[in-house]
Amino acid sequence: MKQQNELTITQPVFYILLVLSIQKSHGYEIMKKVGEYSNGKVLLGPGTLYTAIKRLFDAGFICESANSGGDIRRKYYEITPKGMSIVSDELKRFQTILTVAQKHDLHTYIQNI
């Protein structure tokens, strides 16, 4: 799916934005949280992570944080209002999908897989 600035919101990109919507983070922490929040289904290597961070930064969805969390060796990132809008839109889309699935009792099928 294409959104603002023609940035494709892939699963890794969404999870990076999700992590940063919860807290400012540095690269390694983002990698750990993405793995945690996706139950290990999305595992980012440094190349994938920093390519996505550059794209998100260039699109204005994230920025470098002025607060380094006390560790000046690490670059911290935070989500911008534009990035938060993307997270909000995606969560609404997921909620709509979940509502349809529940309406048609697809959740019982998924539980039995």
Image: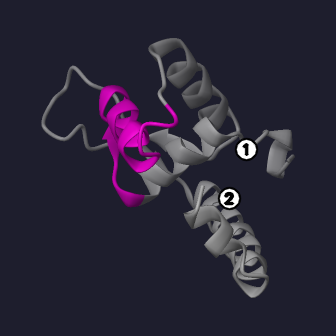
Q: Say if 97 sits above or below 12 in the image.
A: below
Q: Say if 90 sits above or below 47 in the image.
A: below
Residue 10: quadrant of the picture: top right
Res 33 visible: yes
Q: Are marks 1 and 2 in contact (CB under 8 Å)?
A: yes
Among all residues in the image, which is located at the extreme bottom? 103
Query: Percent position (x, y) of residue 91?
Result: 64, 68
The segment highlighted magenta reads 22-42
Mark 2 highlights which residue?
Answer: 86
Mark 1 to mark 2 CA distance (whole Å): 9 Å
Report the disc number at residue 43.
Answer: none
Residue 70: quadrant of the picture: top left
Of helix, strand and loop, which one carries label 2?
A: helix
Query: Percent position (x, y) of residue 5?
Result: 83, 44
Of helix, strand and loop, which one carries label 1?
A: loop
Mark 1 is surrounded, within 10 Å at the Cα level, by few (under 14), some (14 to 19) or many (20 or more) other residues, namely some
Mark 2 is surrounded, within 10 Å at the Cα level, by few (under 14), some (14 to 19) or many (20 or more) other residues, namely some
Residue 26: quadrant of the picture: top left
Query: Percent position (x, y) of residue 89?
Result: 71, 67
Q: Residue at x 65, y 44 (%)?
A: 60
Q: Residue at x 60, y 20 (%)?
A: 51
Q: Amino acid at mark 2?
A: Ile
Res 65 visible: no
Mark 1 or mark 2, earlier in chain: 1
Residue 80 sits inside the magenta stretch: no
Residue 28 sits inside the magenta stretch: yes
Q: Amino acid at mark 1?
A: Ile
Task: Say which quadrant the C terminus sits in.
Answer: bottom right
Q: Residue at x 57, y 19 (%)?
A: 48
Mark 1 highlights which residue?
Answer: 9
